[in-house]
């Protein structure tokens, strides 16, 4: 068993002079950084929770993490299967529900990868590899909600 360790820094930058003296007295802005990275990522909360619409929020980062991990595994599996991916784009969607007595939670993520492969490569295998990529993705394996795939395959 091998353990990987990830350490990041989160710094709240939303104190407007009175701290959290009231729910409306502070903003939700903060930054995220990691060792050996050149830039911090500026974040806020979702606009529904008084966040800055011009900044990323944690929910978007979760969806991006799932899509990124899936893509990296998919590319690896395609290389092993001799499927030449020439282009990969995705527009993933995350669905979170809140209300009632339970706190909000994600209920599903849908990936919409658009992949261009070489003309003579096996498109059925290219589609099937999405299921294997999902099974291998570290982030997907850490989620307690379904992750669906709606791939589109194009030929170069």
Image (tube, rainbow, N blue to C red):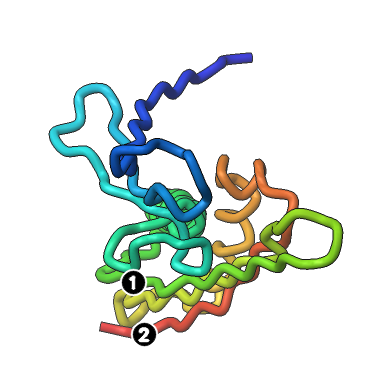
The residue drawn where x is 77% and y is 67% is 99
Q: Earlier in the sequence, mark 1 or mark 2?
A: 1
Callout 1 touching callout 2 (CB < 8 Å): no
Image quadrant containing the C terminus: bottom left
For mark 2, what is the residue? Answer: 154
User: Residue visible at 45% across and 60% down?
Assistant: 60
- Which residue reaches farthest left? 38
Q: Is residue 22 visible?
A: yes
Asked where in the image residue 83 lies, by quadrant, the reply is bottom left
In this view of the protein, which residue sits in the foreground, 130 or 8? 8
Q: Secondary structure at mark 2?
A: strand
- Measured in 3D between alpha carbons, the distance from the residue under mark 1 to the one under mark 2, in whole angstroms, is 11 Å
**Residue that carries the numbered disc 1 in the rendered image:** 89
Front in this rendered view, residue 69 or 92: 92
Helix, strand or loop for disc 1: strand
| Residue 116 to residue 27: above or below | below
């Amino acid at each position: 068993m091998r353990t990987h360790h990830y350490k990041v820094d989160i710094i709240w930058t939303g104190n407007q002079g009175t701290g959290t003296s009231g729910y409306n007295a502070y903003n939700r802005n903060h930054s995220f950084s990691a060792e050996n990275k050149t830039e911090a990522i500026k974040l806020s909360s979702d606009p529904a929770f008084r966040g800055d619409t011009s900044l990323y929020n944690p929910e978007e980062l979760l969806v991006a993490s799932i899509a990124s991990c899936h893509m990296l595994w998919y590319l690896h599996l395609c290389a092993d299967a001799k499927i030449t991916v020439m282009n990969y784009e995705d527009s993933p969607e995350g669905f979170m529900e809140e209300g009632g007595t339970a706190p909000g939670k994600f209920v599903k993520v849908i990936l919409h990868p658009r992949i261009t492969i070489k003309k003579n490569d096996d498109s059925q295998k290219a589609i099937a590899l999405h299921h294997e990529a999902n099974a291998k993705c570290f982030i997907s394996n850490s989620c307690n909600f379904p992750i669906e795939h709606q791939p589109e395959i194009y030929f170069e």
